[in-house]
Every structure is written in C-alpha cells, then in structure tokens.
Image (cartoon, rainbow, N blue to C red):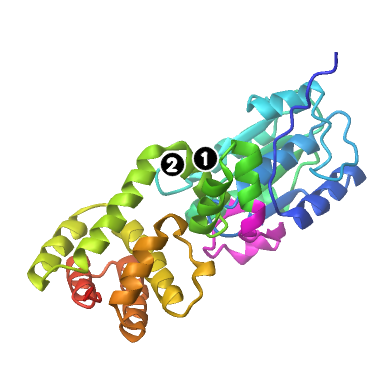
Amino acid sequence: MISQPALIPVFGHAWAQRLLQSAVLSGRASHAYLFAGPDQIGKTTLARAFAQALTCHSPRPAENGLGACGQCRSCRLAASGSHPDHRLIEPEGDQLKIEQMRDLIREATLSPIEGRYKIFIIRRFDFANIHAANALLKTLEEPSDSTRILLTSGQGALLPTITSRCQVLNLRTLPLPTLAAALHTGWQAPPEQAELLARLSGGRLGWAVQMLAQPANWQARHDRLHALLELTRQRPVERLTFAAGLAKSNNSEETLHDWLLWWRDVLLVQHACDHLIVNLDQRQQLHTLAAATLPGEVRRFIEALIAASQHLRQNVNTQLALEALLLKMPAAT
C-alpha cells in the first residue's frame, strides 16, 4: 500500500512555485533567496516547501508544487517540521539579534545529516538589527556549497547589501477566489464563511486561517462593529469616553482597520456597489446605516480614519487622535 505524499501545501503564488521548481529540478538553486511581501500571505510556508523540495531524495516535475516527491524520508521529516537539516529562525521579541546569526554561522559549518543541504529559514529579516544583518552578510558573500539561506521579509526596507546577494521573489496577496478555495479545501471552511474570510483578509491567507482557528477573533470583530454602531447614535461626551478607553487598550489599530472596512462598505452601498462589500454577514446593518448617512460625510470620515491610522503608527498622542476622529464620525439620523 502506497502512503499519501507528505507535502507542505502552498496555495497561490503559482509563478513563484514554477520558478522554484525549475531551480530544484535543474540543480541550480541560488545560495540565498528572499521572499518579500505583505504579512501573512504564505511567505514562510513557501520557503518551507522550497526547503522540502531542495532536500528531497527524488525530486520530480509536478503541475502543482515545487517538485518534492513527498514520499522519501527527507520529505516526511520536512513535512513534520523535524528535519535535522532545516532550521527556522524567528525574531526574539521584536528583533532578530546578532547572537542568532552567530549561531547560524556556526551551524552552517557543519555537514548536512540527511542530504545535500543545510537550510536556514529566517523569518522577518526586516526585523534584524544592523548588527545581525552585517553578521549574516559574510555568509551571503562567501556561501558554502552545502548551505542554502531563505529569508522572508515584510515590506520594510532591507540593506541593499543583503538584497543584492539574494534572488528576490516579490510576492503579493492572493486573489480572493484562490484564497476562498484554499480555505474550503484545505481547512474545510463552509463556502459562505470562506468567501467572507477571503474578503476580510484582503488576500492574506495566514490572517484568514487565524480567524478560522480562533472563535475569540470572531467575537472581537463583532464587539468592534457593535461599538461602532452604538457610537453613531451617541452624543459627543459618550464618544470621548469611548476614545479614552480605546486609547488605553491594545487593539486600537485593529479597531480602526475594521471600521475602515465598514465605512468603505457603507459608501459602496450608497453608490449601488454592494456586490463589492467586505462585510458580507452585515449586509442588513450596512444598508440601514447607508440610508441614515450622507455619502459626503462618509467619504470624509474614511479619509479621517486613514489619517488617524497613520498617526497611531507614528506614536502621536493616541487619545487625542482618537477623540478627534470619533467626533467626526457620521451620526445615524
């Protein structure tokens, strides 16, 4: 009896999968790759699947995937996260530190145990401090034949000396139909929930999977939207009280993000474009609020939301920024 292949599944990024599979099958993989793009779009998963294919004992062409056979011992170890030649390095707190890079450099001098390569996957290299980045630079400049380094990065700037020594793959968010299909087939999400999550995620599969796995996230979203609807009916003094509480919480950015999507949906409904809304499960409430507000004031509040979100990222006075914002929120008449 033939067992099922143990492959690390990758959803989307078809062009990158084809490029990486070609590198695997030709035996001409670069010594370092940088997977760059927005957060939670599958960069680390793609890097892990590439590592699996690079150390596969019997790589083969495939219409989908990166060329790993999924049957050999190496593939099964990689799929289980226990491959002795694969090392995942993540930020400690909010930084990648020089000590982590020094450990990598020492480990890179050792011979692989299972196959051709030792592979280091370094997540969020945009979190590396200058000392950590410079420590890795020498390894990138003088690569070992038996070492491959796979970096992932958000949209933060990296040192040109790092990027110039890597093959860079600039990845994008997933198309919403691709993401919805992935949630339905890979995580058994019902079709309606999969479509809702795809729209809410903005094409970020990792975000959608987290929402699916943690019911508390759904409740938090419900609470944020409920608070918004209450605020549209409240007096200025009550809005200021809410702003003070939100400023002391640790979820002001998530709240403004949810509100931005909500008011965008309201504006779309007002312009008869409700087939484009994100909050599919809130259609009735969106239509009610769209009828009770004016498009001009909704548009101005969306602009204020975007500005407030930028201010919060710049560490301005959070409470003042939120107070000013909430006093501009349209009132339901």
Residue occupying image coordinates x 20% and y 58%: 246
Question: Along the polypeptide, which appears first: circle 1 or circle 2?
Answer: 2
Q: Amino acid at mark 1?
A: Gln
Find the magenta span and give its range. Answer: 151-178
Asked if residue 106 is among those painted magenta in the image, a careful observer would answer no
**Residue 79 location (% of width, % of height):** 69, 29
The picture quadrant where one finds residue 106 is top right
Q: Which residue is mark 2?
A: 92
Q: Amino acid at mark 2?
A: Glu
Closer-to-camera residue (76/265): 265
For the C terminus, give its image quadrant.
Answer: bottom left
Most distant residue in the top direction:
1
- When asked about the image quadrant of residue 253, the answer is bottom left
Query: In this figure, which residue is indicated by the disc labeled 1?
Result: 100
Determine whether the residue tagged by mark 1 lies in a helix, strand or loop: helix
> What's the residue at 66%, 61% (across, down)?
163
Residue 165 in view of the camera: no
Q: Quick check: 323 left or right of 13?
A: left
Q: Are marks 1 and 2 in contact (CB under 8 Å)?
A: yes
Q: Nearer the viewer, residue 282 or 137?
A: 282
Q: Position of residue 191 (x, y in %)?
A: 58, 46
Magenta-drawn stretch contains 164: yes
Asked if residue 85 lies left or right of residue 291, the reply is right
Q: Residue at x 25, y 70 (%)?
A: 316
Left or right: where 292 falls relative to 56: left
Provide residue 307's location: percent of width, then percent of height. Answer: 34, 76
Q: Quadrant of the N terminus?
A: top right
The one nearer the camera, 53 or 211, is 211
Q: Is residue 266 above or below residue 121?
A: below
Residue lying farthest to the bottom in this orientation:
296
